[in-house]
Image (cartoon, rainbow, N blue to C red):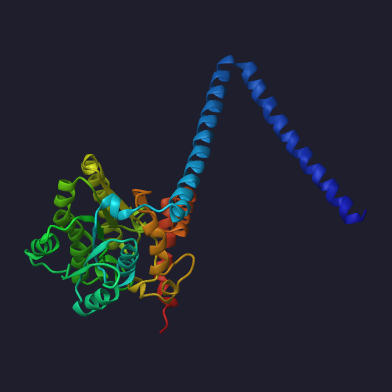
Amino acid sequence: MSIESVAEVLYKKKQRGRLSRYWATMGFIFQIIRDIDPKLRVVIDTFTLLGLIYSTRVVFSLLSTAFTGFRVHLWSRVWKIDLKQRYGEWAVITGATDGIGLEYARALAKRGLSLVLIGRNEVKLARVKTELSPITSVVTIVADLNSDDPTLYERIATDIDGTNRDIGILFNNAGVMYDSPNRFMDQPEDKVWQHVRVNIAAVLMMTRAVLPGMIARRRGLVINMSSIAAYKPLPLMGVYSASKVFVEWFSKTLEVEYKSYNIEVQTLMPSYISTKLTSFSDLLQKPSLAFPSAETFTANAVATIGRASKTTGYWSHGLQHFLTDWFVPEWAYTLSSWHFLRNIDNSKTK
């Protein structure tokens, strides 16, 4: 045996000896305290019990999270739900011409649902309709959800339900984000109003347009696009973050109010996805495990329908949320987000 090996063995024995002496000392101290005052024994036993209860709670929570992750993100990809049979024949999707909305349209069409696609660009809508018409029925509605026209949603509701379609799914996908991270007062006022109209008002009014039919048929699913930014404050994206908090709470209350009508509500809360909304950064535009493409994200997210009422939609985003929720306090998350978003333009090609 070499000198190094002997030294390593002796070092490990020394460490084990120190650890044994430490625990022996602690046990001796506790025993002395309990002998001095029997009342302290009750205190020590109480804290021991509380520690055991807390440890059990932590272990149970970790196991529950792991099981939920397996069921939502892995098992759901194998055991698929018949969406048409469960919810209805038609799906309504806002913001359906690009990114996640377009990928959801493609995915739901493959699952046998007919589509009502809403977007502001007539040319893009026509292009999507041409692509998907060979495999399903497609109806398009040209509408700018950033409009302040008071008759907008009345017209949309009429167009949607004009032929008494069996609307089973509403996906409130349309959304806006800052053109680049910035302080609140450095954002143009029209961008602030755009967040209110598209991220908040459109979710409310589209739900009002579709929900009556779901109530009458006593089945349906409303999917609302929130964001992981709703979990904790996101400085330099304040209005966006706040608007997504609104979506989360609205979804929760809607689920409770209409559960008796067999209407489900799912809140999607993803992290960054490589779409037009993240075009302010080259880093976020490059698909990766952390920042998936819209196609990759949708393949995972669609599989979670009927499996979870609230989900990040993508396994790595779920892992991000778990790690930040368990190990990163809010002040640290806010500070790191501040520095990340402040410097994110450094990743943009000049």
- Judged left or right of residue 125, residue 109 is right
Residue 119 point in image, percent of width and height: 21, 71
Residue 273 point in image, percent of width and height: 39, 67
Please tell me whether residue 211 is drawn above or below residue 131 in the rendered image. above
Instruction: Tell me where residue 245 sits by quadrant.
Output: bottom left
Residue 324 point in image, percent of width and height: 46, 53
Of 42 and 50, which appears nearest the observer? Answer: 50
- Judged left or right of residue 114, residue 111 is right
Please tell me whether residue 275 is drawn above or below residue 42 in the rendered image. below
Instruction: Tell me where residue 117 sits by quadrant.
Output: bottom left
Residue 26 point in image, percent of width and height: 67, 30
Q: Residue at x 22, y 64 (%)?
A: 195
Residue at the outermost front position: 134
- Indicate the quadrant containing the C terminus: top left, top right, bottom left or bottom right: bottom left
Residue at the outermost right position: 1
Instruction: Tell me where residue 93 sits by quadrant.
Output: bottom left
Of 316 and 92, which appears nearest the observer? Answer: 92
Residue at the outermost left position: 151
Q: Residue at x 24, y 43 (%)?
A: 262
